[in-house]
Image (spheres, rainbow, N blue to C red):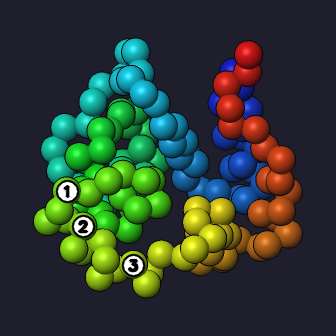
Amino acid sequence: MNQYSSVETKISKSLGLKIRPVAVKFLETPPKGVTKFEGAEPSGCSFWRIAAAGKIFYTVPSDHYNCAVGSHTHNIPLPQERAKVALQLKHLVTPAGMGESFHVLVASKGIDADRAATLSGLNFSKKN
């Protein structure tokens, strides 16, 4: 079992997930052997849904321009016309960032906080 499979298993068992968890990684160059996402989606979360269904792909910053909140949380600079929408939605983004968003997501799915706490200390980085 590779490193990511063991992380996936731990997350899935700890949270009692019915679907596979999704991994997101920020890279400077496209990953070798991975296909670029083609098409358009209304939100960054749409990419998570597609990945959870088993599709492996990468995106580029412009793929996320339809989602002002997702662009903000992923630190993707928006073009001027999209930045106006981001300002209008700014109040929806928490200052605590994605860590707090993860806890809100877990709670919204009805996952017990004690079960989520068992994930503390997971390492998603590539081993050297």
The amino acid sitting under disc 1 is Pro
Q: Are marks 2 and 3 in contact (CB under 8 Å)?
A: no
Determine whether 42 is above or below 33 in the image: below
Residue 88 sits in quarter? bottom left
Q: Residue at x 30, y 72 (%)?
A: 86
Residue 65 against residue 51 in the figure, above or below: below
The answer to the question of whether label 1 and label 2 lie on touching residues, with beta carbons closer than 8 A, is yes
Distance of label 2 from label 3 (alpha carbons): 10 Å
Q: Is residue 60 above or below residue 93?
A: above
Amino acid type shown at disc 2: Ala
Q: CA distance from mark 1 to mark 2?
A: 6 Å
User: How crowded is the residue under tag 3: few (<14 C-alpha within 10 Å), some, or many (20+)?
Assistant: some
* Position in image of residue 47 (x %, y %): 36, 50
Locate residue 54, reporting x and y percent.
43, 39
In the picture as drawn, the residue positioned furthest to the front comes out as 80
Give the percent coordinates (x, y) of residue 113: 79, 72
**Residue 43's spot in the image, x, y percent?**
30, 62
Q: Which residue is mark 2?
A: 83
Residue hosting label 3:
90
Residue at the (29%, 63%) spot, across then down: 67
Quarter of the rendering occupied by the C terminus: top right
Task: Please name the residue that numbered disc 1 is placed on.
Answer: 79
Of the residues shown, which amino acid type is indicated by label 3? Lys
Question: Callout 2 environment at 10 Å: few (<14), some (14 to 19), or many (20+)?
Answer: some
Horizontal side, residue 8 vs residue 62: left or right: right
Q: Is disc 3 placed on a helix, strand or loop?
A: helix
Secondary structure category for the residue under label 1? loop
Going by the image, does 98 lie left or right of 118?
left
- Asked if residue 1 shows in the view, the reply is no
Which residue is painted at 32% across and 53% down in the image?
Answer: 77
